[in-house]
Image: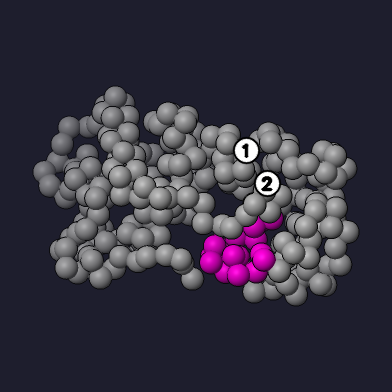
Amino acid sequence: MAMNGGARRKPETRLGLVRRARKMNRILAETYPDAHCELDFRNPLELLVATILSAQCTDKRVNMVTPVLFSKYPAVEDYAAADRSEMEEIIRSTGFFRAKTNNIIGMAQAVCERHGGEVPGRLKDLVALPGVGRKTANVVLGNAFGVPGLTVDTHFQRLVRRFGWTEETDPVKIEHAVAELLPKSEWTIFSHRVIWHGRRICHARRPACGVCPLAALCPSFGTGPTGAEEAAKLVRSGPFS
């Protein structure tokens, strides 16, 4: 594996990969000490709804919509009995609003019927709810229940492959591969760090390689501009629109 665009090195051992992954995580921790979930919420239900809305939509846009939504539907029973057309109008700007309305109402009805109106705190129960996959479930578990989980969104998938941590393309396989490299206690916060890094520096098309704190450890260094001045112009700051 060639690091930092330089001379080729010997194939990386499993132990070497684990050590490199953990060092990269430490650097990300130093770079983004305030990394956190960028969706606004006050309880597990609000986070679950916000995460459903975040599909194919920015957190910034979701946060613009949820104050009205959360005010109109303060309890899971309110979502379960919601007028579909009214909810669609509130969340229209998040995109795919009809499907999201179906998912939110269906999720709420299932929570009422199966879990006594309380959002469940187990992965197997969450993924059985309408519109809730592993990514959404791990967001809720990690940030509302304190249960460690990896949030394998598009940023996460792109970055861990660029890091050379895995060649898998299936989200579940990526999740398992990365989970084996880091302590379980780090899974949730690592997800935030890597998502922040993907939004700010390691962009899909032109990553700001020249100012990346992981440059010396990243086999994909050189995918974007390597000069500091040019790369610095690509760095973005939140909130993201």
The residue indicated by pointer 1 is: 145
Q: Where does the image place residue 85, in percent across and percent down from the top left?
A: 83, 72
Circle nearer the N terminus (2, 1): 2
Rendering coords of residue 83 (x, y %): 86, 67
Question: Please, what secondary structure does the residue beneath circle 2 have?
Answer: helix
Q: Is residue 16 above or below residue 225?
A: above
Mark drawn on residue 44: 2
- Which of the pair 113/20 is nearer the observer? 113
Residue 101 location, quadrant: bottom right
Which span of residues is magenta-colored?
Answer: 49-67
Q: Seen in the image, is 119 located left or right of residue 53?
A: right
Q: Quadrant of the N terminus?
A: top left
Q: Is residue 203 left or right of residue 220?
A: right
Farthest-out residue, top: 15
Q: Residue at x 81, y 58 (%)?
A: 79
Residue 36 in sight in this render: yes
Where residue 140 sits: x, y (%)? 62, 44
- Nearest the viewer among 19 and 69 is 69
Residue 164 shows up from this direction: no
